[in-house]
Image (cartoon, helix red, strand yellow):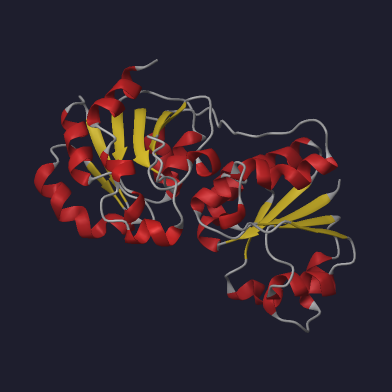
Amino acid sequence: MKKILIIREGALGDLILTFPVFFSFKKNGYRVFAGGKGIYKNFIEKYGNVEKFIPLDSSEYLFFFESENTKLKGFLKDFDIIIAYTDEKEIIGENLKKNFMNKIIFHPVKKEKLNIHITDYLMKPVKEIFNKNLYFSINLNLKNKGEFFLIHPGSGSKDKNWGKEKFLKLSENLKNVKLLLGPAEENELSFWKRNFKGEIFFNLDLEDIIKIAERTIAYIGNDSGITHLFSITGVKTIAIFGPTSPFIWGPRGKNVKIVYKNLECSPCVYEKMKNCTDKKCLEEIKVEDILSFISDG
Protein backbone atom coordinates (compact mmCIF):
# COMPACT_ATOMS: atom_id res chain seq x y z
CA MET A 1 0.00 0.00 0.00
CA LYS A 2 1.37 3.42 -0.95
CA LYS A 3 2.31 5.94 1.73
CA ILE A 4 1.81 9.69 1.64
CA LEU A 5 3.06 12.41 3.95
CA ILE A 6 0.91 15.55 4.07
CA ILE A 7 2.48 18.58 5.76
CA ARG A 8 -0.05 21.13 6.96
CA GLU A 9 1.13 23.49 9.66
CA GLY A 10 -1.45 25.79 11.18
CA ALA A 11 -4.12 26.02 13.85
CA LEU A 12 -7.07 23.72 14.52
CA GLY A 13 -9.32 25.22 11.85
CA ASP A 14 -6.57 24.94 9.23
CA LEU A 15 -6.18 21.24 9.93
CA ILE A 16 -9.90 20.51 9.94
CA LEU A 17 -10.24 22.26 6.58
CA THR A 18 -7.56 19.81 5.37
CA PHE A 19 -9.53 16.73 6.49
CA PRO A 20 -10.95 16.20 2.95
CA VAL A 21 -7.36 15.76 1.72
CA PHE A 22 -6.65 13.13 4.38
CA PHE A 23 -9.95 11.35 3.78
CA SER A 24 -9.55 11.37 -0.01
CA PHE A 25 -6.11 9.72 0.07
CA LYS A 26 -7.31 7.16 2.61
CA LYS A 27 -10.34 6.35 0.45
CA ASN A 28 -8.05 5.85 -2.53
CA GLY A 29 -5.96 3.25 -0.76
CA TYR A 30 -3.08 5.22 0.73
CA ARG A 31 -1.57 4.98 4.18
CA VAL A 32 -1.87 8.59 5.29
CA PHE A 33 0.67 10.35 7.51
CA ALA A 34 0.34 14.04 8.37
CA GLY A 35 2.65 16.58 9.94
CA GLY A 36 1.85 19.76 11.85
CA LYS A 37 1.54 21.21 15.35
CA GLY A 38 1.90 18.55 18.01
CA ILE A 39 -0.90 19.93 20.18
CA TYR A 40 -3.40 18.40 17.71
CA LYS A 41 -1.76 14.96 17.42
CA ASN A 42 -4.29 12.87 19.36
CA PHE A 43 -7.28 14.61 17.78
CA ILE A 44 -6.03 14.23 14.21
CA GLU A 45 -5.07 10.59 14.68
CA LYS A 46 -8.51 9.77 16.08
CA TYR A 47 -10.73 11.76 13.71
CA GLY A 48 -8.61 12.76 10.71
CA ASN A 49 -8.32 9.37 8.99
CA VAL A 50 -4.52 9.42 9.32
CA GLU A 51 -2.34 6.54 10.43
CA LYS A 52 0.11 8.77 12.26
CA PHE A 53 0.47 12.49 12.95
CA ILE A 54 4.01 13.86 13.05
CA PRO A 55 4.43 16.68 15.61
CA LEU A 56 6.85 18.83 13.63
CA ASP A 57 7.34 21.24 16.54
CA SER A 58 8.66 18.52 18.86
CA SER A 59 12.35 17.88 19.57
CA GLU A 60 11.97 14.36 18.18
CA TYR A 61 11.45 15.73 14.66
CA LEU A 62 13.91 18.62 14.62
CA PHE A 63 15.67 16.86 11.73
CA PHE A 64 12.98 18.28 9.40
CA PHE A 65 14.62 21.67 9.95
CA GLU A 66 18.28 20.61 9.87
CA SER A 67 19.89 21.02 6.45
CA GLU A 68 22.55 18.30 6.70
CA ASN A 69 21.28 15.09 8.26
CA THR A 70 20.65 11.45 7.50
CA LYS A 71 17.69 11.09 9.85
CA LEU A 72 15.32 12.94 7.52
CA LYS A 73 16.38 10.89 4.51
CA GLY A 74 15.87 7.70 6.48
CA PHE A 75 12.47 8.83 7.76
CA LEU A 76 11.24 9.75 4.28
CA LYS A 77 12.58 6.78 2.32
CA ASP A 78 9.40 4.66 2.52
CA PHE A 79 7.01 7.39 1.35
CA ASP A 80 5.77 7.40 -2.23
CA ILE A 81 4.63 11.03 -2.32
CA ILE A 82 4.69 14.17 -0.20
CA ILE A 83 2.24 17.06 -0.38
CA ALA A 84 3.58 20.09 1.47
CA TYR A 85 1.32 23.10 1.96
CA THR A 86 4.43 25.20 2.50
CA ASP A 87 6.73 27.22 0.29
CA GLU A 88 9.51 25.11 -1.16
CA LYS A 89 11.94 27.94 -0.37
CA GLU A 90 11.29 27.62 3.36
CA ILE A 91 13.75 25.57 5.42
CA ILE A 92 11.48 22.53 5.59
CA GLY A 93 10.85 22.74 1.85
CA GLU A 94 14.55 22.92 1.00
CA ASN A 95 15.25 19.95 3.25
CA LEU A 96 12.47 17.87 1.73
CA LYS A 97 13.88 18.48 -1.75
CA LYS A 98 17.38 17.51 -0.64
CA ASN A 99 16.36 14.33 1.15
CA PHE A 100 13.37 12.89 -0.75
CA MET A 101 13.82 11.32 -4.15
CA ASN A 102 10.19 10.61 -5.02
CA LYS A 103 7.42 13.03 -5.99
CA ILE A 104 6.94 16.19 -3.93
CA ILE A 105 4.05 18.58 -4.51
CA PHE A 106 4.45 22.02 -2.96
CA HIS A 107 1.13 23.85 -2.69
CA PRO A 108 1.71 26.82 -0.36
CA VAL A 109 -1.24 28.62 1.20
CA LYS A 110 -0.95 32.38 0.68
CA LYS A 111 -4.03 33.72 2.41
CA GLU A 112 -4.00 37.12 0.72
CA LYS A 113 -4.11 35.49 -2.74
CA LEU A 114 -6.90 32.97 -2.19
CA ASN A 115 -9.96 33.50 -4.38
CA ILE A 116 -11.68 30.12 -3.90
CA HIS A 117 -12.70 28.22 -0.79
CA ILE A 118 -9.64 27.06 1.11
CA THR A 119 -10.64 23.38 0.96
CA ASP A 120 -11.09 23.58 -2.82
CA TYR A 121 -7.61 25.11 -2.98
CA LEU A 122 -6.11 22.41 -0.75
CA MET A 123 -7.78 19.72 -2.86
CA LYS A 124 -6.29 20.93 -6.18
CA PRO A 125 -3.26 18.58 -6.11
CA VAL A 126 -5.49 15.72 -4.94
CA LYS A 127 -7.82 16.17 -7.93
CA GLU A 128 -4.82 15.97 -10.25
CA ILE A 129 -4.02 12.52 -8.84
CA PHE A 130 -7.52 11.00 -8.46
CA ASN A 131 -10.80 11.47 -10.28
CA LYS A 132 -13.00 9.62 -7.79
CA ASN A 133 -13.48 9.07 -4.05
CA LEU A 134 -12.93 12.75 -3.32
CA TYR A 135 -14.20 14.61 -0.26
CA PHE A 136 -14.88 18.34 -0.07
CA SER A 137 -16.57 18.29 3.33
CA ILE A 138 -16.54 15.84 6.23
CA ASN A 139 -19.23 14.56 8.56
CA LEU A 140 -18.16 12.43 11.50
CA ASN A 141 -21.83 11.52 12.11
CA LEU A 142 -21.51 11.57 15.87
CA LYS A 143 -24.39 10.18 17.88
CA ASN A 144 -26.29 13.11 19.31
CA LYS A 145 -28.51 13.30 22.39
CA GLY A 146 -29.58 16.92 21.78
CA GLU A 147 -29.63 18.09 25.41
CA PHE A 148 -28.63 21.78 25.23
CA PHE A 149 -27.58 24.72 23.06
CA LEU A 150 -23.91 25.68 23.13
CA ILE A 151 -22.42 29.15 22.64
CA HIS A 152 -18.73 29.81 22.02
CA PRO A 153 -18.22 33.61 21.99
CA GLY A 154 -14.49 33.63 21.19
CA SER A 155 -11.90 32.91 18.52
CA GLY A 156 -8.20 33.32 17.90
CA SER A 157 -8.76 37.03 17.19
CA LYS A 158 -11.10 39.37 19.06
CA ASP A 159 -11.49 41.34 15.82
CA LYS A 160 -13.57 38.46 14.40
CA ASN A 161 -15.88 38.19 17.41
CA TRP A 162 -19.52 39.17 17.62
CA GLY A 163 -20.02 41.22 20.80
CA LYS A 164 -20.13 39.32 24.08
CA GLU A 165 -23.16 41.39 25.12
CA LYS A 166 -25.00 40.09 22.05
CA PHE A 167 -24.01 36.53 22.83
CA LEU A 168 -25.31 37.08 26.36
CA LYS A 169 -28.61 38.40 25.03
CA LEU A 170 -28.81 35.42 22.68
CA SER A 171 -28.33 33.06 25.61
CA GLU A 172 -31.20 34.75 27.45
CA ASN A 173 -33.47 33.93 24.51
CA LEU A 174 -32.65 30.22 24.58
CA LYS A 175 -33.71 27.51 26.98
CA ASN A 176 -31.05 25.22 28.38
CA VAL A 177 -27.93 26.88 27.03
CA LYS A 178 -24.32 26.32 28.06
CA LEU A 179 -21.15 28.30 27.36
CA LEU A 180 -17.78 27.18 26.02
CA LEU A 181 -14.71 29.35 26.68
CA GLY A 182 -11.09 28.74 25.74
CA PRO A 183 -7.76 30.27 26.78
CA ALA A 184 -8.31 33.22 24.40
CA GLU A 185 -11.40 34.20 26.43
CA GLU A 186 -9.78 33.99 29.86
CA ASN A 187 -9.85 37.77 30.30
CA GLU A 188 -13.64 37.67 29.77
CA LEU A 189 -14.25 34.85 32.22
CA SER A 190 -15.26 37.22 35.03
CA PHE A 191 -17.86 38.87 32.75
CA TRP A 192 -19.45 35.53 31.97
CA LYS A 193 -19.37 34.27 35.55
CA ARG A 194 -21.07 37.48 36.64
CA ASN A 195 -23.76 37.57 33.94
CA PHE A 196 -24.31 34.10 32.51
CA LYS A 197 -26.72 31.88 34.46
CA GLY A 198 -25.87 28.53 32.91
CA GLU A 199 -22.95 26.12 33.04
CA ILE A 200 -19.60 27.31 31.73
CA PHE A 201 -17.08 24.92 30.17
CA PHE A 202 -13.60 26.44 30.31
CA ASN A 203 -10.34 25.42 28.64
CA LEU A 204 -11.36 21.88 27.73
CA ASP A 205 -9.27 19.56 25.60
CA LEU A 206 -10.56 18.61 22.16
CA GLU A 207 -11.74 15.16 23.21
CA ASP A 208 -13.95 16.69 25.90
CA ILE A 209 -15.35 19.15 23.35
CA ILE A 210 -16.27 16.21 21.11
CA LYS A 211 -18.17 14.69 24.04
CA ILE A 212 -20.01 17.98 24.51
CA ALA A 213 -20.86 18.02 20.79
CA GLU A 214 -22.60 14.67 21.28
CA ARG A 215 -25.02 16.42 23.65
CA THR A 216 -25.50 19.68 21.71
CA ILE A 217 -28.75 20.66 19.98
CA ALA A 218 -27.12 23.53 18.10
CA TYR A 219 -23.80 25.35 18.35
CA ILE A 220 -23.32 29.10 17.79
CA GLY A 221 -19.87 30.66 17.39
CA ASN A 222 -17.57 32.98 15.48
CA ASP A 223 -15.06 32.21 12.75
CA SER A 224 -12.89 29.94 14.90
CA GLY A 225 -11.26 26.54 15.06
CA ILE A 226 -13.95 25.31 17.46
CA THR A 227 -16.64 26.32 14.96
CA HIS A 228 -14.86 24.26 12.30
CA LEU A 229 -14.69 21.39 14.75
CA PHE A 230 -18.45 21.48 15.31
CA SER A 231 -19.09 21.74 11.57
CA ILE A 232 -17.73 18.20 11.02
CA THR A 233 -19.61 16.61 13.93
CA GLY A 234 -23.02 16.73 12.24
CA VAL A 235 -24.37 19.04 14.96
CA LYS A 236 -26.28 22.08 13.70
CA THR A 237 -23.58 24.75 13.51
CA ILE A 238 -24.26 28.47 13.17
CA ALA A 239 -21.11 30.38 12.21
CA ILE A 240 -20.99 34.16 12.54
CA PHE A 241 -18.73 35.89 9.99
CA GLY A 242 -17.83 39.57 9.84
CA PRO A 243 -14.45 40.79 8.54
CA THR A 244 -13.32 37.41 7.19
CA SER A 245 -14.77 35.80 4.09
CA PRO A 246 -17.08 32.82 4.56
CA PHE A 247 -16.68 32.13 0.84
CA ILE A 248 -13.02 31.30 1.51
CA TRP A 249 -12.88 30.35 5.21
CA GLY A 250 -16.42 29.24 6.02
CA PRO A 251 -16.97 25.82 7.62
CA ARG A 252 -18.59 23.25 5.38
CA GLY A 253 -21.12 20.62 6.30
CA LYS A 254 -24.69 19.59 5.62
CA ASN A 255 -25.81 21.07 8.93
CA VAL A 256 -23.89 24.37 8.77
CA LYS A 257 -25.52 27.80 8.60
CA ILE A 258 -23.42 30.93 8.04
CA VAL A 259 -24.57 34.36 9.20
CA TYR A 260 -22.92 37.09 7.12
CA LYS A 261 -24.09 40.56 6.07
CA ASN A 262 -21.84 40.89 2.99
CA LEU A 263 -21.31 44.64 3.33
CA GLU A 264 -19.27 46.65 0.85
CA CYS A 265 -16.41 46.91 3.35
CA SER A 266 -16.25 43.20 4.12
CA PRO A 267 -14.42 40.95 3.91
CA CYS A 268 -11.31 43.01 4.59
CA VAL A 269 -7.57 42.55 4.82
CA TYR A 270 -5.85 41.83 8.13
CA GLU A 271 -4.53 45.36 8.76
CA LYS A 272 -7.90 46.93 8.02
CA MET A 273 -9.59 44.44 10.34
CA LYS A 274 -7.16 45.26 13.16
CA ASN A 275 -7.67 49.01 12.80
CA CYS A 276 -11.43 49.07 12.18
CA THR A 277 -13.29 50.94 14.91
CA ASP A 278 -16.97 50.42 14.09
CA LYS A 279 -17.06 46.73 12.96
CA LYS A 280 -20.30 47.28 11.02
CA CYS A 281 -19.97 43.81 9.52
CA LEU A 282 -20.52 42.36 12.99
CA GLU A 283 -22.63 45.11 14.54
CA GLU A 284 -25.33 44.72 11.90
CA ILE A 285 -25.85 41.08 12.83
CA LYS A 286 -28.73 41.03 15.30
CA VAL A 287 -29.75 38.49 17.92
CA GLU A 288 -32.94 37.98 15.93
CA ASP A 289 -30.86 36.91 12.91
CA ILE A 290 -29.27 34.14 14.93
CA LEU A 291 -32.55 33.04 16.46
CA SER A 292 -34.08 32.72 13.00
CA PHE A 293 -31.22 30.46 11.92
CA ILE A 294 -31.67 28.33 15.05
CA SER A 295 -35.37 27.87 14.43
CA ASP A 296 -34.89 27.24 10.70
CA GLY A 297 -34.92 23.50 10.20
**Residue at (22, 45) in percent of width and height:** 164
Left or right position of 195 against 254: left
Left or right position of 57 against 79: left
The quarter of the picture where the N terminus appears is top right
Q: Is residue 183 above or below residue 219?
A: below
Q: Pick out the residue farthest to the front.
A: 264
Q: Pick out the residue farthest to the top.
A: 297
**Which sits in the foreground, 256 or 234?**
256
State the image coordinates of residue 181 (x, y, percent, origin top left). 29, 49
**Residue at (57, 70) in percent of width and height:** 57
**Which sits in the foreground, 189 or 163?**
163
Which quadrant of the view contains residue 120? top right
Q: In this view, does 254 lie above or below 261?
A: above
**Residue at (76, 74) in percent of width and height:** 94
Q: Pick out the residue farthest to the bottom.
A: 68
Which quadrant of the view contains residue 133? top right
State the image coordinates of residue 12 (x, y, percent, origin top left). 50, 52
**Residue at (48, 43) in percent of width and height:** 245
